[in-house]
Image (tube, helix red, strand yellow):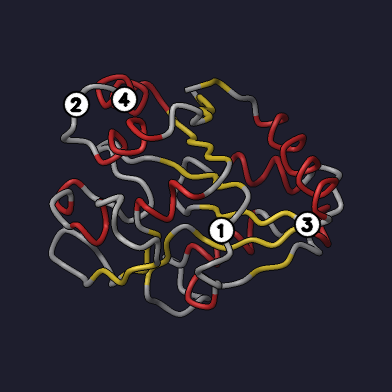
Amino acid sequence: MKLLSVDQIKGLISTNIELQDSCALAISGGSSVRAVCRHLSHTKLDWGKVTVTTVDERCVNPCHVDSNQRQIQNILIQNNAKNCGLIPLVDWEITNYPDIAIFGMGTDGHFASLFPSMLDDNDLFDLNHEPCVIKIEETDAIKHARLTMNLSFFIKIPTLILVVSGSARKQVLDQAVTDGKYPIHKLLQNRDDLGIILQS
């Protein structure tokens, strides 16, 4: 793991644009990434060369209050970033891995829609499974059916940035380094270059 600042994300996006004339971002919903997205929206970049999708999405209308796409449109694709492109996860080309993923983590150690109750699901967590986007059905514990990138897909993304908000999530992250009951443990095991942004 390596600590990053929000300002360093600008450099990472700029580098991708310089090298390949484009940059693809995958961003989660949730409260942790809102401040990062808001900051980025005021950043001066060639946003017309940036495309965004979500790492997971609830199967709701894009205008629904619980839609991750809606959050990205309302917070990131504003101000200087208003020319940024947006492709819904359901329409994302599976063989086209985003350059950078920016995502939060719950106090149960879940990321995207990869929850502790799903750790035995090989489609979601087995690295030998084909990288893909998988539909998860609604349960008593999970509001709305969802689409999510599986762990194999995450591992293929060149730059991963986890936003950790508050002391409770920081404690979970510390425990997850060795404790396999947390989904984020699977990512920590396989990506020692994971970038971390700490927020109070």
- CA–CA distance in space, label 1 to label 2: 28 Å
Residue at point 36% right, 31% down? Answer: 188
What amino acid is found at the position of numbered circle 3 in the picture? Ser
What amino acid is found at the position of numbered circle 1 in the picture? Tyr
Residue to which mark 2 is pinned: 179
Residue 39 in which image quadrant: top right
Q: Earlier in the sequence, mark 1 or mark 3?
A: 3
**Viewer-nearest of discs 1 and 2:** 1
Q: Where does the image place residue 121, in percent across and percent down from the top left?
A: 17, 57
Find numbered disc 2 in the image and state the secondary structure of the residue it sits on.
loop
Find numbered disc 1 in the image and state the secondary structure of the residue it sits on.
loop
Say which of 35 and 86 sits in front.
Answer: 86
Position of residue 164 in the picture relative to residue 69 (left or right):
left
Residue to which mark 1 is pinned: 97
Position of residue 138 in the picture relative to residue 82 (left or right):
left
Q: Earlier in the sequence, mark 3 or mark 4?
A: 3
Label 2 environment density (alpha carbons within 10 Å; few <14, some 14–19, many ≥20):
some
Q: Earlier in the sequence, mark 1 or mark 4?
A: 1
What amino acid is found at the position of numbered circle 4 in the picture? Ala
Residue 22 circle label: 3
Residue at point 72% right, 67% down? Answer: 85
Residue 153 circle label: none
Residue 14 higher or lower than 123, as above or below: above
**Viewer-nearest of discs 4 and 2:** 2
Q: Do callouts 1 and 4 mark residues in contact (Cβ within 8 Å)?
A: no
Q: Earlier in the sequence, mark 1 or mark 2?
A: 1
